Amino acid sequence: MAEVVDIRARVLAANEQAAAKLRDQFRAGAALVLNLISSPGSGKTTLLEATVRALGGRLRLAGIEGDIATERDADRLRALGIPAVQILTGGACHLDARQVRKVMDEAHFPAFDVLFIENVGNLICPTSYDLGEDFKVALLSVAEGDDKPFKYPAIFARAAVTVITKADLLPHVTFDLDAVRGQVAALNPGGRLLVTSAKTGEGIATWCALIEERLATKREAEA
Ligand SMILES: Nc1nc2c(ncn2[C@@H]2O[C@H](COP(=O)(O)OP(=O)(O)OP(=O)(O)O)[C@@H](O)[C@H]2O)c(=O)[nH]1
Ligand SMILES: [Mg+2]
């Protein structure tokens, strides 16, 4: 058991080193980087599609998509005209910083203002792996149940922003939004919570404004 813990600690330490290098690289490029984490099907790629439609004309956006199989998500972003690279993890349930560095170093990745890294869909493994991002974004769709923040506390405690998705479905599902607000506030008092629907457009302008504000703040801090 002690050996397992030791190996895990070493893997995470190596990841931290790679993430620190990535963070330096992103800072040098004056770019903002978001790491999106949620269960499969919560609406990560759909939110990114809405974001590209809203912000693509103003900012240079790019995507890295993590999945077990298929290029589907990267294809969806490329179809909207932004550069996107698919990382296939070969079964692993999360992206790691080394994989992101490989994309940055080898793919002749074009310069960007904002990079969205969509992690492999689940609320558990991606939480521990720093990808050099500025902040993590946890997504929770209203169809998943209003008990999830307390059941998966690590991600909701670490994500600077929680995005509730599919708000258009609220009339059709049992989901106590106030209860979720309370759980997220308890786990992460400094965090933001946004309510969105990619279908109706609710909350998308607020989400895009948050991205623009965080990018401006980062650039001012580095200037
Ligand atoms: N009603 C409704 N459906 C949505 C919304 N956003 C996404 N969906 C649907 O939810 C399903 C999953 O959306 P995706 O964006 O592919 O989810 P994802 O989190 O990227 O999924 P993985 O990459 O597989 O983890 C699709 O059928 C979307 O059309 C929304 O705001 N409202
Ligand atoms: Mg997706």
Image (cartoon, rainbow, N blue to C red):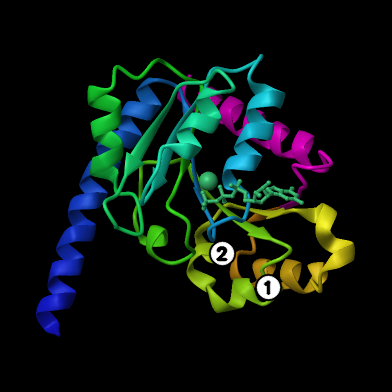
Q: Residues within 10 Å of mark 2 (few under 14, many from 20)?
A: many
Task: Tell me if I can see residue 34 in this picture.
Answer: yes
Label 1 within 8 A of ligand 1 by Cβ: no
Residue 86, image quadrant = top left
Q: Is residue 213 visible?
A: no
- Which residue is at 76% across, 48% downward? 196
Q: Give the residue number, with chain letter if any, for mark 2.
A: 156
Using the image, determine if residue 109 lies above or below residue 38.
above
Q: Amino acid at mark 1?
A: Gln
Q: What residue appears at the point 60 percent right and 25 percent down from the top-left corner?
A: 216
What SS does tag 1 mark? helix
Image coordinates for residue 6, horizontal then vertical, percent: 13, 72
Please determine whether, in this image, residue 85 is positioned above or below residue 202. above
List the residue tagged with mark 1: 183
The quadrant holding residue 10 is bottom left
* Residue at the (79%, 42%) spot, across then down: 199
- Are the two marked residues, 1 and 2, in contact with CB atoms closer than 8 angstroms? yes
